[in-house]
Image: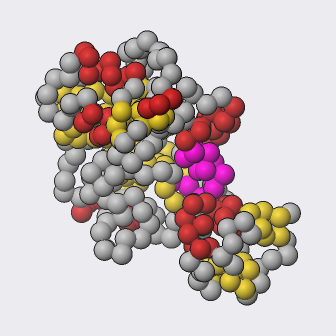
Amino acid sequence: MSTRLNKFLADRGVASRRASDRLIEEGRVRINGRVVTDLGTKVEEQRDRVSVDGKPIGGRERHVYFVLNKPVGVITTLNDPEGRRTVRDMLPRGARVYPVGRLDADTSGLLLLTNDGDLAHKLMHPRYGVAKVYRVRLAREPRPDQMRRLSTGVRFDKGLVSGRARARRIDPGFDAIMIELVVHEGRFRQVRKMCEAVGLEVTGLHRVGYGPIRLGPLARGMFRELSDEEVTKLRAESARAGRSAPDGEAARPKSSERPRRPVVEAASADPRARGAPRGVRRGRESRKSTSRPAGDR
Ligand code: URA
């Protein structure tokens, strides 16, 4: 069976498809001893010998799925040339998984990691519009018009208008001003930029949901394996999302603004109450974490 090279590498847990493309472009991948740099290259799985940086790539690995409660200050990458703490430092030694999307260094919370290239690709693709749930800690009480603008769409970057979102004021159970924002896109620093665009000052950002997955009572710096039920739900979500992208499928150019949906105040149950953890373990270096994100609970 012939498979595109980046998919072949992602399926074997080498890197995400996009990161695999970079490996190919950098001339680090060989097929049958020959360096290949053409991103369209295909591999005959049964016949071809593939290596990365001289290391042979073996057969398919068992797929594994982790959810990590990323602390503030940890970088969403597997290697940092500057030597900062990365999400790899939080996982079991030797785990060959890569992050599904990213959280900024100053954002905490739910990060999925897997070696299932297909699923990761679908979950990350803007076209699938997987919902991400954020708790946003604010410096001041939001006004109704600001909440409305977050929900209906706001120009948050040059020419980019956010799509369908849900915003509601929540009570975090401690002394803080907090809203929950559900977005279906994942542009760089999007939530912070959206808030800034409507005049809200963000003092903490914490992700508690990704599609059907909830962080649940997972402590900062800890990870757990997804249950079989959660993996099934994730697959169903990616299949469903692929068939009908939501109206806010991706940030739209201002020029293509469409009629907006009425504001809906989200009424989802507290995500912290859901999601039974399986095999909760402490990240290898989680005890080193000293900073506590403002919105992190
Ligand atoms: N939006 C942000 O602003 N930052 C993140 O890390 C994720 C979403």
Q: Is residue 158 left or right of residue 178?
A: right
Give the quarter of the image for residue 96.
Answer: bottom right
Q: Residue at x 55, y 41 (%)?
A: 126
Q: Is residue 189 above or below residue 133?
A: below
| Residue 46 in view in this figure | yes
Give the quarter of the image for residue 137.
Answer: top left
Front-most of 80 and 201? 201
Q: Residue at x 23, y 41 (%)?
A: 204
Q: Residue at x 63, y 55 (%)?
A: 116
**Image location (x, y in percent) of residue 284:** 36, 64
Front-most of 16 and 96? 16
Q: Which residues are magenta?
A: 113-125
Query: Quick one: quadrant of the C terminus?
Result: top left
**Image location (x, y in percent) of residue 49:** 76, 80
Q: Is residue 48 left or right of residue 111?
A: right
| Residue 56 in view in this figure | no
Taking the view exactly as shown, the residue that stands out farthest to the front is 255
The colour mode here is secondary structure
Q: Secondary structure of the magenta portion, mostly?
A: helix
Is 121 included in the stretch rendered in magenta?
A: yes
Is 140 included in the stretch rendered in magenta?
A: no
Query: Quick one: quadrant of the N terminus?
Result: bottom right
Taking the view exactly as shown, the residue that stands out farthest to the top is 262
**Image location (x, y in percent) of residue 259:** 49, 17
Q: Residue at x 56, y 69 (%)?
A: 22
State the count of labels. Answer: 0
Q: Is residue 73 left or right of residue 184?
A: left
**Image location (x, y in percent) of residue 144:** 25, 15
